[in-house]
Amino acid sequence: MDAVEKANAERQKRWVKDQKVGEGTYAVVYRGREAATGRKVAIKKIKVGQFKDGLDMSAIREVKYLRELHHQNVIELLDVFSSKTNLNLVLEFLDSDLEMIIKDRSLVFLPADIKSWMAMTFRGLEFCHRNWILHRDLKPNNLLVASDGQLKIADFGLARDFADPGYKMTCQVITRWYRPPELLFGSRYYSSAVDIWSVGTIFAELMLRIPYLPGESDMDQLKTIFRALGTPTEEEWPGHTKLPDYVPMGLFPKTPLRDLFTAASADTLNLLSKCLIYEPRKRITAREALHHSYFTALPYPSHPSKLPKCTTQLAAHALEEVDGNVTMDSTGPGVKAKNGRLKRKLSSPSDDSKTRSIARRLDFTKHTPHS
């Protein structure tokens, strides 16, 4: 047994899988614990053999970026080990997610509660952006909530670095309801502003308790956005008519946010509007958002420990499956891909010997450099 195999075997012994809580095409999620201390964890077992070249890029990215990001508002990757033809990600155990909390009608949200969740989201996102990482799939069920109320950004399977502004990227990212118009129009050059739009739609959803912009197709998504915020003009968003997938969508008048968010403060609406500016370069940044008057005005954000908690806890939801299709067992409700979630279609399995070899060679004990 060589040094890598030996280190992997030792890491594997450190963790115990107790109960399967979810399974999808490409991954299985377990509730587990640390053998020595009994600490609860979630173990996401990715089936390496399902992928043409041994391992899906989303799994590689998730490991790469979570190894680099250490922040109280980003989910912690505790360990990685391989076993046979599987790659196992050991993640901190989290009780629920923001989507479950929003949908729990027994809970009442105070403005201070929403402010607290938004502050934690922006803090985690600012840390990602400061480290040149785009999340590219922010939505309520990727914002997980720990037992102490701390909110943590999770699921970095679509994340990527953006240090080079001239580098083309796919526009087929971010779940449709939370996807900004520049991506819907096919932009291949974009920045951290795409994540900010997603946060704006989540902000609105926290106030409305239903998704703010639920389109049924990419075209309908654009119409839904324009009905809510008005059709952009060339003055508002220079150059948008030249984007690859631009099509005229008709003229919709701009409706004041106050008409829908009747109880929101002026500071609240100002921050929301700055997250949902059409011109990406004019959208507020996460750092600027944290210094916005919304967060210093009364009421002050609720302490995380005082935030509403879900009455139906979902063990290890952390851990939504790689392709977004997990059906949970009786420990919690089903977790399925929402309308518009990007499907990460993967190739057919390669032969066992090849995937065994790839799994054996994976050594994540060292820091992974940026690609």
Image: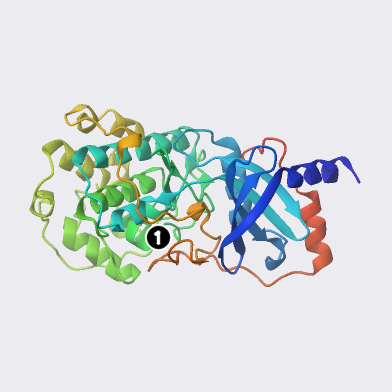
* Residue at the (27%, 59%) spot, across then down: 211
Picture quarter with the C terminus: top right
Q: Amino acid at mark 1?
A: Thr
Q: Is residue 350 above or below residue 99?
A: below
Residue 295 rendering spot, x and y as whole percentages: 24, 31
Q: Residues within 10 Å of mark 1 (few under 14, many from 20)?
A: many
Residue 13 rendering spot, x and y as whole percentages: 76, 45
Residue 223 rendering spot, x and y as whole percentages: 23, 66
Apparent side of residue 204 relative to residue 193 in the rendered image (left or right)? left
Q: Quadrant of residue 367?
A: top right
Residue 95 rendering spot, x and y as whole percentages: 45, 49
Apparent side of residue 159 relative to residue 180 in the rendered image (left or right)? right
The residue furthest right is 1
Q: Is residue 32 above or below residue 117?
A: below
Q: Quadrant of residue 173?
A: bottom left
* Residue at the (10%, 46%) spot, across then down: 263
Q: Which residue is mark 1?
A: 175
